Structures are given as C-alpha cells and as structure tokens.
Image (cartoon, rainbow, N blue to C red):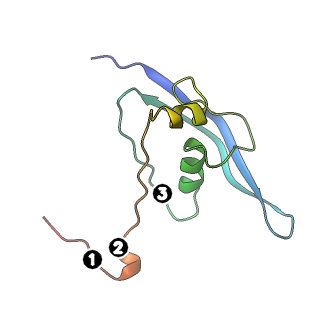
Amino acid sequence: MYRRTERWLDNRGMTYKTTDGRDVTALTSVSLDIKKGEFISLLGPSGCGKTTLLRIIADLLQPTKGTITVGGETPRQARLKQRYGISFTSTCSKSGAKPTKP
C-alpha cells in the first residue's frame, strides 16, 4: 500500500540567545519527511536538539530559520485539528532503576 509522503520540515534551524547575548545553535538544516500514518521516534544523545525539534513541531517554539508545515498546515493549525501526537519519555537511568527484561 502506498502512503503519501508529507514534507514536515525542510532545512529548518533554531538558534537561542544566552543570557550574556551569545548565539547557541540548537538545530541546523533539519529536514524530515513522514508518510501518513507512520510512527517515528527521535533518538540521540543529550543536547542534540530532539526536544527543540519536538517543541517546534508542537507549536511551542518558532524556528529562527525557515518555516514548518505539518501536512501542508502550520503547526498551530495541525495542533488544533489534532493531526499528530507527541509523547515525551525519559530513561530510568537517572533514577537508578534498571529496565526489566520480558
């Protein structure tokens, strides 16, 4: 079955200003294509921009470079129509707990 690919992000970036006025780049040239109905995960080390990217998709931040569309709509329009879902998780290693084996 063919599923139409939707362009979500194309060459987007995010730069923050620190309290002393320096620029810190969180995202550089990020592009993402997702097929309708597809489930994706963002994996990477701490500080690589996963949360920043999700905040942009969720309409909590505006990218400082470029624009974003979610299925052809702005993130705000898509959020209000509930076109996607986001689940934030964290590892249990910080609490000292170990994952259980099935």
Q: Is residue 94 above or below residue 32?
A: below
Lower sequence index among marks 2 and 1: 2
Q: Is residue 70 left or right of residue 90?
A: right
Residue holding disc 1: 98
Q: Farthest residue in the right direction? A: 21
In depth, the one of 39 and 81 nearer the eye is: 81
Q: Which type of secondary structure does the marked residue at label 1 adopt?
A: loop
Lower sequence index among marks 1 and 3: 3
Q: Residues within 10 Å of mark 2 (few under 14, many from 20)?
A: few
Q: Which amino acid does the dot numbered 3 rest on?
A: Gly
Q: CA distance from mark 2 to mark 1?
A: 7 Å
Residue holding disc 2: 92
Q: Farthest residue in the bottom direction? A: 96
Q: Which amino acid does the dot numbered 2 rest on?
A: Cys
Residue holding disc 3: 44
Q: Residue at x 58, y 50 (%)?
A: 55
Q: Is residue 29 left or right of residue 20?
A: left
